[in-house]
Structure formats: C-alpha cells, structure tokens
Image: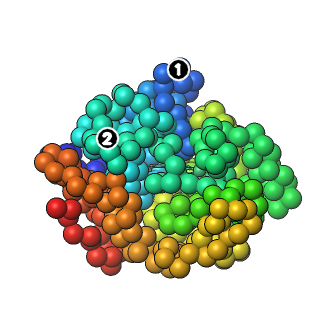
Amino acid sequence: ALPSPPGPLNNPLAKLVNDPAHPWIAPGPNDMRGPCPGLNTLANHGYLPRNGIVTPSQIVTAVQEGFNMGNDLAVFLAYAVHLVDGNLLTNLLSIGGKTSETGPDPPSPAIVGGADTHAVFEGDASTTRADAFFGDNHSFNETLFDELTAFSNKFGGGAYNLTVASEIRFQRIQDSIATNPQFSFVSPRYFTAFAESFFPLAFFVDGRETNSLTLDLTVARGFFQDGRMPDDFFRSNISWTLGAIGGGVEVIFEAHPVLPGANNGTINSYTVDPNSANLSDGCKAYTDFVDVIVRGLYPSATGPLLQALNQNLDFFFGAISTSGCTQVPAFV
Ligand code: HEM
Ligand code: MG
C-alpha cells in the first residue's frame, strides 16, 4: 500500500525558510525543472529532491514547509498532477519533462510525461510561460515577464498586486485568443489559470508582510526565472487552504469574468464551452478530471496499476471530502 498523504504543519506560521539547511543551488544539467516556479524553487533549495524526481508525499511536505500551502490544497494539487503526469507504478513524478528516471511506464494511453505534459494539467495562457502551441510551455519567457512588468507599472505602482493579477490574467487570455489557434481554456486549466495568478501573492510575498498582498518585481523574477527565494525569506504567515485561495480567485475572475472555452482552430474564434466546469462548479471540475482525464489515460488498468490508481484517487478525493462533492466510484 502507498503511504497516506502527510497531514498539516504543526506550526503553521511564518518562519525563515531560506535557511542554511536549504541553500539555493542551481540545477545541474540532469536535474528536471518545469512550468511551476513553486516546485522549481523547492527543488533548488532542497525542500524537494534536487533532481526533480519526487513523490506526491514529498510535494505535500515541501509546499507546506517551504511556502505554508494549506494541507487540503497541497494534497489536491500533488495528487492531481501525480495522477496524470506521474508513474503510478513507481510512485515517482518529474516536476519537468519526461524521463526514464521515473521508471518503466505503464501501457499507453498513459503518458507519464512529467509536469510539462500539455493539456492534462499544464495549460495555456500561463503567466511567464508560453503556450505549448509555440513550442515551449515550461521555460521562463522574458517577453512575458516584460508584459508582467509593464502591467505592474501601469496598475500596481511597480509591484504585483491583486489589481495587476486581475489585469494580467485577462491580458494573457486575450494574448492567447489573438495568437494561438489551438488556445484551450477549459477545466482543469480554467481553474488553475486563475489560481496561479493569485499564487504569487499568497506564496512569494515574505511572511512578515503576508497581508500586504504586494510582491516586489525583483523578488518575483527570482522565483519565476531562477526558482530562488530572496535572502532571509520567510514563508507565508497563514496556511493557504483551497477556500482561502478561492477567495483570491473570485476577485480576479470578477474583474474580467471570462467563461471557459477555446479557439476553434483559428485565431480570434474564442467560443464558450458549456461542457466545461466553471468556477461555480468545483464538484464538476473534480468529477470530470477523474472521469474524463484520468480515465482517458487509464481506460483498462488491472492488477497493481489499478490498485495504485484507486489509492491515488482516494488520496485526491480526501482533500475535498468535506466539500459536499460525491466521490467518483473506484475504477474497475
Ligand atoms: C504553475 C504544479 C505548487 C506557483 C504550475 C503549473 C503546474 C504546477 C503543472 C503549470 C500550469 C501552467 O501554467 O500551465 C504545481 C503542483 C503544486 C504546485 C503540483 C503542488 C502543490 C505551487 C506553489 C507555488 C506555485 C507552492 C508557489 C509557491 C505557481 C505559479 C504558476 C504555477 C506562480 C504559474 C507559472 C507561470 O505561468 O508563470 N504549477 N504547483 N505552485 N505554479 Fe505551481
Ligand atoms: Mg502553461
């Protein structure tokens, strides 16, 4: 049996996390890094294995310890990504691209491509990463950071704040509508896009000023580009649960309430998709993720693979078991 997900922090307050035990060390040529500046940072500081090959439990422990992510959100994200991008037989996941270091793959259509894999979790209109259509969905993109800087100057007095988050989120959607014929903006990407715009305010702001929700751009660049905490960095002073992040997501959405949808193969053809979950239906987002995306990758698992699949699905649902959603029955 797989280990159960770790529980919450005992002391969920701000503390020094860029400490002598966790120095920043640049990744080596064989170390995996990917589209998430949070996970990249945790690997560069040794909160995650520096090679970027991790277990979902290690992710939960690291995001809590290093950034004070709440336990429900940590478990939800870690197991979501592991279910679609990880190797369920070896319990290993690459936080970047595909690698043999996660062990022998289960049969296709399973992908086991790491966090870089497009469309099952990673998606379009990212903040500082380009759309997969343009060839690289995971590397820091200076042009996009320049856009973020311009918006921070225009709307945030030179810093990233909630107004900037709202405006740049909308701008990135407009960018993709206007340039990416394959732009897709449906669940789960629809949810993660709004969340990732709030994450820098929750997690990259020093814990001695959590309430400011204001992020210096030099600090932002350190995280986004180099996966690096500033010197003397304290983690957030509150544990950011699903509900707390949801509050930020709501504000960002309300500023420009774009509904889930996609371009239809040509640019500037964005059409709302009524089949996608929207922000008011989190249970549908959960159910569709399991029933459509995970099931699509594992339509006929048997034996140890089926057992691992169902255990990971149980851990995943455990994160939202008090939300009123109904668990999708175990795969057979
Ligand atoms: C983006 C995974 C935790 C900050 C992403 C993406 C993935 C991911 C796959 C790419 C989505 C996309 O833009 O297409 C995860 C997982 C986590 C986690 C599995 C486990 C709990 C965190 C934490 C932080 C963070 C703790 C902050 C400290 C971000 C940000 C982005 C992002 C800011 C947007 C990057 C950009 O587009 O510039 N994450 N993440 N994540 N994540 Fe994470
Ligand atoms: Mg992306």
Q: Position of residue 47 (x, y in %)?
A: 44, 35
Quickly name the residue at label 2: 87
Q: Is residue 312 left or right of residue 265?
A: left
Residue occupying image coordinates x 71% and y 69%: 269
Up-down relation of residue 277 to residue 8 (above or below): below
- Give the numbered dot on residue 310: none
Question: Judging from the image, what secondary structure is the residue with disc 2 in?
Answer: loop
* Residue type marked 2: Asn
Q: Is residue 312 left or right of residue 100?
A: left
* Quarter occupied by residue 185: bottom right
Q: Position of residue 44 (x, y in %)?
A: 52, 30
* Residue type marked 1: Gly
Task: Confirm whether residue 18 shows in the render.
Answer: yes
Between disc 1 and disc 2, the foreground one is 2
Residue occupying image coordinates x 29% and y 54%: 298
Q: Pick the residue in front: 293 or 156.
A: 293
Q: Residues within 10 Å of mark 1 (few under 14, many from 20)?
A: few
Question: Judging from the image, what secondary structure is the residue with disc 1 in?
Answer: loop
Task: Confirm whether residue 22 shows in the render.
Answer: no
Residue occupying image coordinates x 27% and y 71%: 327
Q: Pick the residue in front: 74 or 184.
A: 184
Residue occupying image coordinates x 51% and y 42%: 116
- Give the numbered dot on residue 28: 1
Quarter in which the C terminus is drawn: bottom left
* Lower sequence index among marks 1 and 2: 1
Alpha carbons under labels 1 and 2: distance apart? 23 Å
